[in-house]
Each structure stands twice: as C-alpha cells, then as structure tokens.
Image (tube, coloured by chain):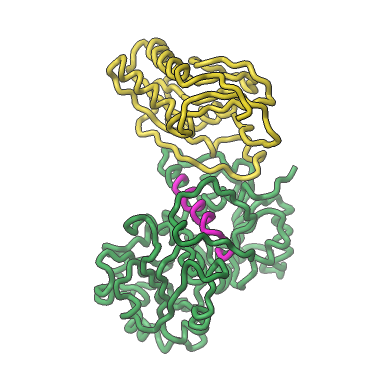
Chain colours: A green, B yellow
C-alpha cells in the first residue's frame, strides 16, 4: 500500500478539516492517514445520527448496487454490511458461496467478473484466503471492501473497535491508553487490522496470548515502523504474561479462539487456554476500574471470556455490533465518492 | 479580494430583523413555528432570526440544524463525498410550520434536498423558505417566502456570504468565478 504521512503526535486528536477521501477500495487499514481515520470516525457520527431518525434511511447511495459475496460463514459482518447498504438506499445483492456457482468450481476472478457484469458497483467480500480481496480488486472496476480475508485483515471491524473505544474512553481519544488484545493473535485478522489503527491512534497497544499463538509477532513488534513507515506515533508490545498485560489496562479485547483453526496442536486444550488466558472478573481486578471489555464475536463464553464479564459493567460488546452498522455506512458512503462512474 | 460587496454588516442586520418580522407576520404569531437552518450558514442565520423574534415577540422559537449531504442529487458529479456537518432537530416536526433558512438561493436543488430530508422526519403543516440572498437561476419550481436581498447574477459569478459565526465577519460579496469549481453548489 502507499506510504502514509502520519501526523506528528501533537496533531493527533485535532479536528479534521475537509479531508478528501481518495481510496477506491478498503482492503486494510495500513494505507490510511490519521486524518482519514478521523474522517471515517466523523462520518460515523453522522451515520449514528441517521440511525436515530424515525426513518433511518437516506438516499445517499440510491442507484448504486452493492454485492455482498461471502465465502466464509458470518452473521454480524454480512448482515451489518447489508443493513448499512440498505440504510443508504443502495440495491443489495447477497451471495453465499455455498449456494452459488462457486460450488461448481467457478474461480474467484470469474465470480468477480460475473458480479460486475450483473451491475455491481461495490463488492463486499469475505474469503478464507489472505489477500483474496486484493485479487478481486484487480479485476473489479468498482470498489472492493474487505469483510475479512484469512488471517490478514478485517478493516471494518477494527474501525468499529476504534469508534467504540473513542466513545467510551474519557476524553474521546485512545492516545496513550493501554489497549490489550488477548487470545489467538496468530490466526486473527481482527488483531492485525487493529494493530494498524490503534498504533496510528497512538494507543499503548499490547498483544497477549500463549507463545504458540503469538509466533512471529515479537519480531514484527521489534521491527515495527508504524503505518507511517517512520515508527511514529505508535508501537506495540507482545507478551505471554497476562497479569502484566492487564495491569492498569483501559481496554481489554478478547479474541475468539477459532476452534476451526486449532487443528495444528497449538493449544493443548480449550480448558487449559480458559484457565490461563480466559478473561475473568478476578483477572480484570488488576486493570483500570473503568476498563472496557470488547470482543469481536462470536464469543465462546467460558473459553476466552467468562459469561459474567461478557455482560458485565464494562462490556461494550453489543455496542460494537450496533456501531458496526454506522461504521460500515460511513465507509460505503466515502468509497462511493471515490468510485469511478459509469454511464 | 477580487469581488465587490453587495451587502454590508449593517444591511445584513436590517434584513435579518425585517425577515424575522415577516416570518411572525405570515404565521400570524409564533404558535407552532420552528426555524431550521441548512448547514452550514443557514444555521447561524436561523439562530439570528430566533434571537430577533425573542427580542420583539418575547417568544423563544425552536431552532434546528439540517445537513442535506445525504439527500443531494449531485453526488455523482462531485469529485469527493462532501464532509457531513450533522443534523440536529430536537423537536417533533409533525404539524408544525417549518421555516427553512439558507444563506443563498440559487438553483433550488439544496432546498429540494432539504424538503426531502424534512419529510423523512415527519409531516410538517407547512414548509416555508427564508434566504439572505436570492441570486436567481432556478432549476426547480422553488421560490423563497422571505428574501433579504434579490441580486441579479450571472452563472459565472459566485456569491459569498460571510457570517461572524462561521467566517469572522458579516458581509455578502460577489466575484467572478476563478478557474475552480468550488462554490458550484448553491
């Protein structure tokens, strides 16, 4: 992705002037400047206001066709994109790979070309293979939005995470706040996208989990140059010591233990994981008393997060889902402005 | 500045007071009256009308703000999505008389979009329109009920309204369009 001009730290948290949106696709967050993050956050505020209206629908994307193509199971991301597109008056076509010609062996590129020939202007896709949306973007004349690709990226999730944190953290900024992501970091596209956004936001970011599920991240943290390529403003820490990670934490995000990706024997057992890394009320006692508890869903309650914590005082897990619609409306709207026109 | 001034601060003040009287006169009072400014300069203008009504009628008329970005019909013509400034309508629109307030009336497309947006919030008894400047060149069958000043213009000219709240001073200027498309939306 293109090099980014990250602002000096003193410019963080400044209100955005009329920042121009120039990206045609949203594939990951590594190419975004801080003013672009701010623009998305600000546009999300407006979308939240739209969602509170008696008729939560505006004609901004009238006449645009959004195709939602999911090669992997999903409820919240797929429905959330679908609701978002409909709230903006786009025409929405939803394709589940299981019931399409993909089962007959149609290639990704063929499918993308077919979807385009059928009139799609924007393509939201999820794929089990990292990088698949990048391939799709090369063969699609409209905008591609990555709804999750393999272990690689889940940009709309990281944006809604950032938005939800800013809503709840005193002062409305995560700058200098201790944010801890706990769990299966290795297989997590959510964690990877969050690294880009949270370091850009200047958070004190910690990744924590069993050593087998952090493989490669320590080296990445050491060589981390940040989204700017200059190492400013953020960096992140990697640790297997959950107690140290949670100490004075402002935000704790538990990642889903992906049972479908645990065939490689990286975890002795779910029970051992829960005993050592599960987020429980006792473990949270070392965190900031107002700690926010987050989870990208779907949760394995009793494994990575205790049921009482999931619905406890600091939990903003359902708000993450609600904010997901507003954030996805914002990115659809912004990308629609950068999309080349036809006809 | 390469333009000429068509309204001074004093003229803007007098026009504001006159329009505020006209609004009350037309409504035969202030019962069921709300003012809604269109972002961005319609909002401080609506607040000024409300302040003037408070002064001479001793009634506080509710003021709202409307952002019409999502209702524009020219999104496919502009290079980038405009930045949204926010809608705030802290009252029920059903059955009230809405006076829409904007700084310049030009093609009428902004007002069309504003009316579309308003009816999504409720069913006002009536919608009226108050503008500081009417510069002509309508593309839709829309006219203002209250006008500060009618200004004959050519399409090559740009009318710039400055308000203290948004721009630091009060004045209305007219200038020739430079080689830029900025200000194309009236």
Q: Nearer the viewer, residue B24 or A280?
A: B24
* Residue B106 in view of the camera: yes
Front residue of this view, candidates A11 and A152: A11
Relative to residue B87, is residue A218 depicted above or below?
A: below
Q: Main secondary structure of the magenta part?
A: helix
Rendered residue at 34%/18% (across/down): B53
In the rendered image, the residue lying farthest to the front is B1
On the rendered image, what quadrant is the C terminus of chain A found in? top right
Residue A264 x, y percent position in the rendering: 52, 87
Quarter holding residue A63: top right
Location of residue A290 in the rendering, given as x and y in whole percent from the top left corner: 27, 64
- In the image, A51 versus B156, the foreground residue is B156
Q: Is residue A35 magenta?
A: yes
Q: Position of residue A324 (x, y in %)?
A: 46, 56
Task: State whether residue B185 is above or below residue A331.
Answer: above
Q: Is residue B41 magenta?
A: no
Magenta-tinted stretch: A29-46
Seen at 59% across and 72% down, the residue is A128
**In the visual, does A292 lie left or right of A48?**
left
Horizontal and vertical percent for residue A222? 50, 80
């Amino acid at each position: 992705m293109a090099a980014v001009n990250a602002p000096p730290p003193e410019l963080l948290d400044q209100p955005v002037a009329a920042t121009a949106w120039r990206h045609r696709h949203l594939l990951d967050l590594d190419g975004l400047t801080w003013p672009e993050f701010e623009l998305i956050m600000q546009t999300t505020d407006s979308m939240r206001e739209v969602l509170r209206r008696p008729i939560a629908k505006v004609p901004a994307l009238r006449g645009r066709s959004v195709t939602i193509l999911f090669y992997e199971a999903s409820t919240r991301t797929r429905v959330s994109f679908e609701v978002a597109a409909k709230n903006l008056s786009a025409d929405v076509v939803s394709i589940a790979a299981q019931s399409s010609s993909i089962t007959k062996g149609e290639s990704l590129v063929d499918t993308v070309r077919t979807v385009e020939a059928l009139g799609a202007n924007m393509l939201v896709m999820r794929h089990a293979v990292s990088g698949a949306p990048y391939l799709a973007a090369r063969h699609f004349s409209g905008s591609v939005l990555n709804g999750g690709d393999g272990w690689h990226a889940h940009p709309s999730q990281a944006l809604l995470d950032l938005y939800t944190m800013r809503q709840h953290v005193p002062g409305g900024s995560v700058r200098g706040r201790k944010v801890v992501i706990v769990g299966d970091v290795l297989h997590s596209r959510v964690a990877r996208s969050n690294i880009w956004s949270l370091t850009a936001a200047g958070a004190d970011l910690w990744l924590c989990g069993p050593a087998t599920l952090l493989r490669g991240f320590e080296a990445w943290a050491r060589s981390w140059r940040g989204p700017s390529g200059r190492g400013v403003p953020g960096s992140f820490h990697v640790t297997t010591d959950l107690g140290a990670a949670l100490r004075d934490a402002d935000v704790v995000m538990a990642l889903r233990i992906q049972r479908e990706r645990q065939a490689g024997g990286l975890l002795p057992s779910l029970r051992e994981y829960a005993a050592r890394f599960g987020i429980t009320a006792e473990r949270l006692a070392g965190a900031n008393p107002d700690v926010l508890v987050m989870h990208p869903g779907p949760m394995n309650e009793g494994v990575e997060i205790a049921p009482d914590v999931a619905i406890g005082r600091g939990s903003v897990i359902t708000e993450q889902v609600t904010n997901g619609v507003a954030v996805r409306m914002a990115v659809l709207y912004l990308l629609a402005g950068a999309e080349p026109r036809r006809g | 500045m390469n333009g000429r001034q068509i309204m001074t601060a004093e003229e803007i003040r007098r026009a504001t007071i006159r329009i505020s009287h006209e609004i009350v006169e037309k409504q035969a009072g202030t019962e069921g009256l709300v003012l809604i400014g269109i972002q961005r300069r319609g909002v401080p203008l609506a607040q000024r009308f409300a302040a003037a009504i408070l002064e001479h009628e001793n009634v506080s008329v509710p003021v709202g703000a409307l952002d019409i970005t999502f209702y524009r019909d020219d999104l496919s013509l502009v290079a980038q999505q405009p930045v949204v400034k926010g809608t705030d309508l802290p009252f029920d629109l059903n059955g009230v008389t809405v006076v829409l307030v904007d700084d310049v009336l030009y093609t009428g497309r902004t007002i069309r979009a504003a009316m579309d947006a308003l009816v999504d919030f409720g069913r006002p008894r009536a919608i009226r329109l108050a503008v500081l400047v009417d510069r002509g060149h309508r593309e839709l069958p829309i006219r203002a009920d209250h006008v500060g000043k009618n200004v004959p213009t050519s399409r090559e000219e740009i009318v710039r309204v400055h308000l203290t709240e948004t721009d630091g001073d009060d004045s209305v200027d007219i200038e020739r369009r430079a080689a830029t498309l900025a200000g194309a939306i009236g």
